[in-house]
Structure formats: C-alpha cells, structure tokens
Image: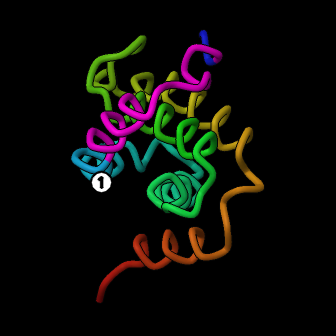
Amino acid sequence: MDTDRILKPVSAEENARRERRVRDTFWQTLRKAAAYIPFSQEVVAGYYCALDSETPLRTRGTLLAALAYFVLPFDIVPDFLIGFGFTDDLAVLTAALGAVHSQIKPRHREAAKHALAPTH
C-alpha cells in the first residue's frame, strides 16, 4: 500500500476538505469498525488531535489524510467485506498514528476516553 501518498503534505484547501469529510462521517464509521480496531481509543485520540487548532499543521494533515481514508466507504479493500474490509484502513491508521504519536497529547487521549466511555 502506498502510505507515502496518504502521508505527504497537501494544501490547506485539501486539509479543509478532509477535515469536513472526517467530521461528517468519523463516528458513524468508527461504530461500524470498532470490533475490528483493537486500538480504537488511540484512533479517537488521533481524531481529537487532528481537529485541535494547536496541533502542528503537518501533524493535522497526516492525521486528516489517514482519517479521511478510514471514513471513505470504498477504498483498496471495501469496508463492507466483513473481517477484511478494515485491514487496509488499519494499516494506514497505524502508520499515521506511529508517525505523529508524540503530538497526540494527554488532553486528546482523555477526550477519547470520555467519548468512548459507556453511558449508563
């Protein structure tokens, strides 16, 4: 898979387009994929990091590209293929999260923990 294409810097307009796509469909996609993603909390922390205006632009771009790929309904391996559909998404998310790991702050992880906490 060509993760370099996903992780390379892009224009501010492209980042804005990706951010809109991610904001619009992230939670719906995460609900469908949660059973296949063993590191969902880190993905959600990455989501909050990507939307944080204090996050460096390059980090935001990397995360938004990976999250945009994640929310696309059709990609290299279509998401509707149960058991296999999210494997390519996992590879892209793993690469992106690994590349920006130090930029994901405790506040992002806390927000993720809160967002994923079961409501009683």
Query: Foreground residue, 81 or 8?
Result: 8
Residue farthest to the bottom, as pictured: 120
Position above or below: 98 against 11: below
Query: Foreground residue, 79 or 66?
Result: 66
Residue drawn 51% across the image and 22% down it:
88
**Magenta-drawn stretch contains 29:** no
Marker count (numbered): 1
**Magenta-drawn stretch contains 7:** yes
Residue drawn 38% across the image and 28% down it:
14
Q: Is residue 34 left or right of residue 25?
A: right
Q: Amino acid at mark 1?
A: Trp
Indicate the position of residue 66 as horizontal and vertical percent values: 50, 33
Which residue in the protein does label 1 denote? 27
**Residues drawn in magenta:** 4-22
Q: Is residue 8 left or right of residue 76?
A: right
User: Which quarter of the figure is the N terminus placed in?
Assistant: top right
Q: Is residue 28 left or right of residue 41?
A: left
